[in-house]
Image (cartoon, rainbow, N blue to C red):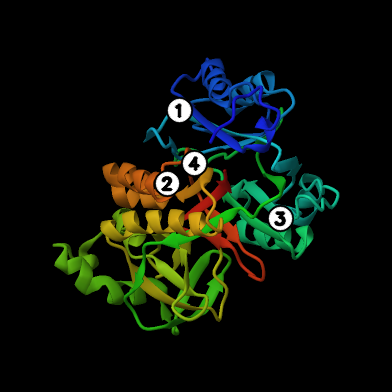
Amino acid sequence: MVLPPDHPQASMTTRIATARSTSATDAAPAFLELQKQLGGAEPSLVVVFASTSAPLEGVMKAAAHAFPKANTIGCTTAGEFTEASEGKAQFVAWALAGDDVTVTAGLGTGLKADPEAALESAIKLAADDAERPHRMAILLLDPLSGNGEEASMLAMTMLGPTVRLAGGAAGDDLHFKQTLVACGNQVASDAVVVALLSSRRPLGIGVKHGHKPMSKPLTVTKAEGSVVHELDGKPAFGVWKDAVRAAVQAEGADIDAIALADVGGHLLRYEVGLIAGANEYKIRAPLSADAAGAVSFACGIPEGAVVRITSSAESDQISSARDAAERARKALGGAKVAGALVFDCICRNLILGPKFGAAVKEIHEGLGGAPIAGFETYGEIAMDLGQSSGFHNTTTVVLAFPA
């Protein structure tokens, strides 16, 4: 039951509102819509996901004007969506109200040169709150700094063993020139934003990708940063082609006849799974290959890592999105979902094309019809207690809030 805003216990009810705008110059109507949905309740957190066609600085100023008491965070994207629609060249906004959750947020720059110092600037630790013992951090970062996975691991260490992590790497509509994150009126590249949430009740994280292994285990025998030169002592691209040749042929193509400049779509169709436990994989997105047989990835893969080539059917990409939502919903322990933030990879959009909207619908339905807002990322972040690595590719991450 949703209480009227003048009810003395109204503040106890968690309320989540979402809005979107296709206007690059007038952000105000979207924030008026949030105010309307919140029924006069003051949000503690407002999140903005904006296309490069909707300049982030202007959108953040409009958010701060509409909600001067709220923590406001955001980033640029490669696509945006709410429960109502998904698309490009727009921005979406999400707001959290009610006194179940308190929020502190900050931004740190210099992520490429010194990720630890950047995180120290971004992390605004709140005092221990016995009434709100459940802690979650939302992490937004500039992936073009090249330190996405390192920043995720450092954040978990610096926040402490009782804080879980969810978030995403900003995008720039596939231009790969500049990605921005924001906190309040601060907007920056080469930066990271951390919003620390303290909650009376546990929040729910759901993580799922739609990939299945199709090769034997392979060892990375030569790698430099995000470039893998060899698998099992052989040129990595050749090993990848051997693994996918039959599957690509069944689709009517010859993998050996495809030019290097045109191989990207196939690389995203048959990605690499980094083995992370029994039948568990963290997906790593290959982006390009060179004539020497090296394959460049969206994030680093260390020498000695064991991987498998994977495949992903469109139906698996759609069903995995619902699975992530249902996992987040289940983690709430039976509570109804008030709403959720979603961090979903741009690679999944490239795989699904016009069917990506079906995946968004599955997330919405998997959360019981709760409002959602999310963006298409250059990397997804999800780290639960006790985990050592939480940077993902081509994966859906859902952060759900109890009603």
For residue 308, what is the image quadrant?
bottom left
The residue tagged 2 is 368
Q: Quadrant of the C terminus?
A: top right
The amino acid sitting under disc 2 is: Gly
- Residue at the spot 30% in from the left edge and 45% down from the top edge: 358
The residue tagged 1 is 90
- Residue at the spot 47% in from the left edge and 59% down from the top edge: 327
Q: Residue furthest right?
A: 127
Mark 4 or mark 2, which has the lower sequence index?
A: 2
Instruction: State the SS at label 2.
Output: loop
Between the residue at mark 4 and the residue at mark 2, the CA separation in whole angstroms equals 17 Å
Between the residue at mark 1 and the residue at mark 4, the CA separation in whole angstroms equals 12 Å
The crowd level at tag 3 (other Cα within 10 Å; few <14, some 14-19, many 20+) is some
The amino acid sitting under disc 3 is: His
Q: Are marks 1 and 2 in contact (CB under 8 Å)?
A: no
Q: Are marks 4 and 3 in contact (CB under 8 Å)?
A: no
Mark number, residue 134: 3
**x then y, percent, for residue 244:** 27, 71
Between the residue at mark 3 and the residue at mark 1, the CA separation in whole angstroms equals 33 Å
Nearer the observer, disc 3 or disc 1? 3
Mark number, residue 374: 4
Question: Relative to 139, is 315 on the left or the right?
Answer: left
Q: Are marks 4 and 2 in contact (CB under 8 Å)?
A: no
Instruction: State the SS at label 4.
Output: strand
